[in-house]
Amino acid sequence: MAEFFHETERLILRDWREGDWAPFWTGTNTPAVMRWLGGVADEAKRAAVKDRLLGYRAHHGHTFWVVERKDDGALLGFCGLKRTNQKGGPLGAMEVGWRLREDAWGQGYAREAASASLDLAFDRFGAEEVVALTVTGNRASWGLMERLGMQRREDLDFDNSEFDAETGRIIVYSIAKSAWQKPDA
């Protein structure tokens, strides 16, 4: 399988390299970044994430790719596509997701990477619909989903306390290929 590489105006989305894992975890395995993702990950959880991300690529041809800033090569986090696999959720649906380090927040990087990922989902990977998952408390995440044109799908919400022990609920947004319009920058 050829290496995945996709450029946007300011970012590169690409496959993982062995040297990416340490800077990824240094930048993203913080209490603020992991607040809605089950908390800071121990070594076992980090190894499981690595295995899952590499497995998605091997089995589906896409994953949550590395997000690298073009101007300085900094690894900002990940963004991309996978098939939903959360217990109780819309299993097998195409899912867009992102996780960026704190100093990359509020600069439009997540929107730029997610927009590119949605383009890829519909144009390259043949998705008819893409979902995104978060928790009610993660306003930044569902706010981005709304800015991307995604619609709240309460009919797909499901119970799972792994990410939000307070509510024990995952909320779902989605967008159909026919509704996708790349947002203005």
Image (tube, rainbow, N blue to C red):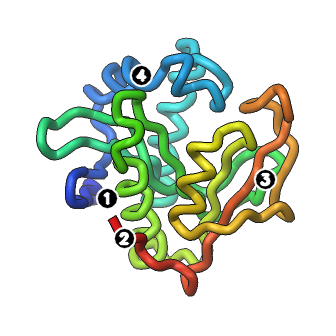
| Mark 1 lies on residue | 1
Tell me which label, 4 or 3, sits earlier in the chain.
Answer: 4
State how far apart marks 2 and 1 are (Cα): 33 Å
Residue 29: image location, x then y, percent:
48, 20
Tell me which label, 2 or 4, sits earlier in the chain.
Answer: 4
Q: Residues within 10 Å of mark 3 (few under 14, many from 20)?
A: some
Taking the spot 46% from the left edge, 72% from the top edge, the residue there is: 125
Q: Secondary structure at mark 2?
A: loop
Q: Disc number at residue 184?
A: 2
| Mark 4 lies on residue | 25
Q: Nearer the viewer, mark 1 or mark 4?
A: 4
Choose top left, top right, bottom left or bottom right for residue 163.
Answer: top right
Tell me which label, 2 or 1, sits earlier in the chain.
Answer: 1
Q: Is residue 174 above or below residue 85?
A: below
Residue 81: image location, x then y, percent:
50, 56
Q: Nearer the viewer, mark 2 or mark 1?
A: 2
- Amino acid type at image mark 3: Gly
Q: Disc number at residue 89?
A: 3
Left or right, 96 with respect to 84, comes to left
